[in-house]
Image (spheres, helix red, strand yellow):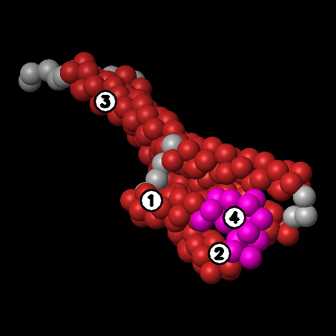
Amino acid sequence: MNWTYRIREQNKVALALGAVFIIIVLANWWVSYSMKEVSNQFKSVYQDRLVPALDIAAMQERYYQNLMLLEEHMQAQSKEQELHLQAKFNQNIKEVDSLLAKYETTLLTQKEAEDLQEFKAALRQLTELQHAAMNLSQTSDKAAASSMYTTEVVPAFNQMLLPLHALSKLQQEVGHELYASAEKQLSSLKTLSYLVIALAVILALLVGALLQTSRSMKHIKPQKFHLN
């Protein structure tokens, strides 16, 4: 009976060691998976939120510049100055088109996609009006260009800013949500690590106790019983 008891104890030890191994493997897998998710979230904060926010600010700056360039164009006293201002104006439009194409490749929420379409429509209207006002200025019809600038270009510019500001605000909100989610996952990983350590300690104590019991059983001499 003694050897059968020792086999049972050895099976318990093996089971406990197997449980420790399984827990370690599962914990390692979950930590690796969670760390990858956290890394992707922080990468998204940079690639899909921080960089696009800077691009939005750059687009806004270019159109503020174009507004001033158009005003300067209407006050220009020579063709050379007009051509110089028009070249800077067209360069800004090309840069905005490039930034916009880059922005469209980033991860967009449904609300961002809707605001983006609204922004593009307002941008097309503003660009057409600016070109029309500049064409009037180039033909020396400065009065008509100035009137169009005041009554149509400036209101169209202000209208274009509405969806652009909405996109900028969404960048901040979604970026904050991604950061909060990453922080929550990191907190969960910290709790999991403490739990795994606690389980490992408990199981190690159990294994030690089982081994101690097994060694104690080996030193017990079997009793010999004789019939009277």
Dot 4 crowding, Cα within 10 Å, few <14, some 14–19, many 20+: some
Q: Are marks 1 and 2 in contact (CB under 8 Å)?
A: no
Tell me the mark number nearer the camera, choosing from 1 and 2. Answer: 2
In the picture, the disc for residue 15 is 3
Question: Label 1 belongs to which residue?
Answer: 117
Q: Is residue 130 magenta?
A: yes
Residue 195: x and y in percent read 47, 50
Residue 46: x and y in percent read 63, 49
Spatial CA distance of label 1 from label 2 is 25 Å
Left/right of residue 79 with respect to residue 224 in the rendered view: right
In the picture, the disc for residue 60 is none
Spatial CA distance of label 1 from label 4 is 29 Å
Q: Amino acid at mark 3?
A: Leu
Numbered disc 2: secondary structure: helix
Judged by its main secondary structure, the magenta piece is helix
In the picture, the disc for residue 136 is 4
State the extent of the magenta-drawn residues as a range. Answer: 129-146
Quadrant occupied by the C terminus: top left
Q: Amino acid at mark 2?
A: Met
Dot 2 crowding, Cα within 10 Å, few <14, some 14–19, many 20+: some
Residue, x 81% and y 63% (percent of image)?
73
Mark sitting earlier along the chain (2/4): 4
Dot 1 crowding, Cα within 10 Å, few <14, some 14–19, many 20+: few
Question: Label 2 belongs to which residue?
Answer: 148
Tell me the mark number nearer the camera, choosing from 2 and 4. Answer: 4
Tell me the mark number nearer the camera, choosing from 4 and 3. Answer: 4
Numbered disc 4: secondary structure: helix
